[in-house]
Amino acid sequence: MRFSLQGIPPDVRWPTATIQHLLRALEIGDDGTTLDEVRQQINDRRSMLWVGYIGDTHKMSIVLTIENTALYAWLMGGEDMDDWIDPLVAAMRRYAREKGLTHLKAVTRPGLAKTLKGWRTTATIIRAEI
């Protein structure tokens, strides 16, 4: 089936699947960011929200920011990732080129980082409770 992406404009009601994807990603990321904070960044146009479909089925949601010369993917969630990760990265590359950016950047879990072709680890984020 065909993968397609849709940008969700600021101040628009999010699909239920998007809320579920992002809440799960926030839970896994465990950095204290809330869904309300994500929504505010999108509403303020500091970040953008893309949702992806395989056919008519909503499969993924990603929050992106342009940071210096990078398209930065800092929150992503979904299901059946093997079906959409490669076309998503291709779309991100096209978008970044159109905007005159030089590279993609992402915060990922270690398992995802290992599956991405053509990416290299440049930092590791660790956390300790205080």
Image (cartoon, rainbow, N blue to C red):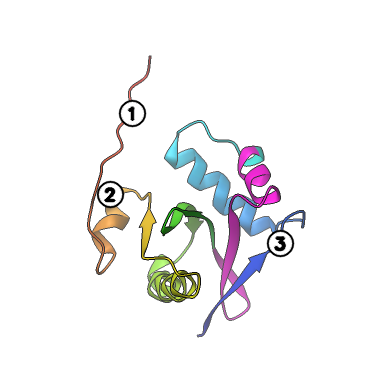
- At 70% across and 59% down in the image, what residue appears? 15
Disc 1 secondary structure class: loop
In three-dimensional space, the C-alpha distance between marks 2 and 3, rounded to whole angstroms, equals: 30 Å
Q: Position of residue 99 (x, y in %)?
A: 50, 70
Considering the numbered disc 2 on the image, is that residue within a helix, a strand or a loop?
helix
Marks 3 and 1 sit apart, C-alpha to C-alpha, by: 33 Å
Q: Residues within 10 Å of mark 2 (few under 14, many from 20)?
A: few
In magenta stretch: residue 48: yes
- Left or right relative to 26: residue 127: left
Q: Which residue is mark 2?
A: 110
Earlier-in-chain disc, 1 versus 2:
2
For the residues labelled 1 and 2, the Cα–Cα distance comes to 14 Å
Which circle marks residue 127 in the picture? 1
Q: Amino acid at mark 1?
A: Arg
Residue 56 lies, in percent from the top left, at: 63, 78
Q: Is residue 32 magenta?
A: no
Residue 37: percent from left, percent from top: 63, 38
The mark closer to the camera, 3 or 1, is 3
Q: Secondary structure at mark 3?
A: loop
Residue 83, image quadrant: bottom left
Say above or below: 123 vs 7.
above
Q: Which residue is mark 3?
A: 9
Tally the numbered discs: 3
Q: State if disc 1 and disc 3 touch (CB < 8 Å).
A: no
Q: For the residues carrying marks 2 and 3, which lies nearer the camera in this image?
A: 3
Residue situated in front as seen by the camera: 37 or 104: 104
Q: What segment carries the magenta color? A: 37-60
Q: Could you tell which of marks 2 and 3 lies nearer the N-terminus?
A: 3
The percent coordinates of residue 31 (x first, y second) are: 45, 33
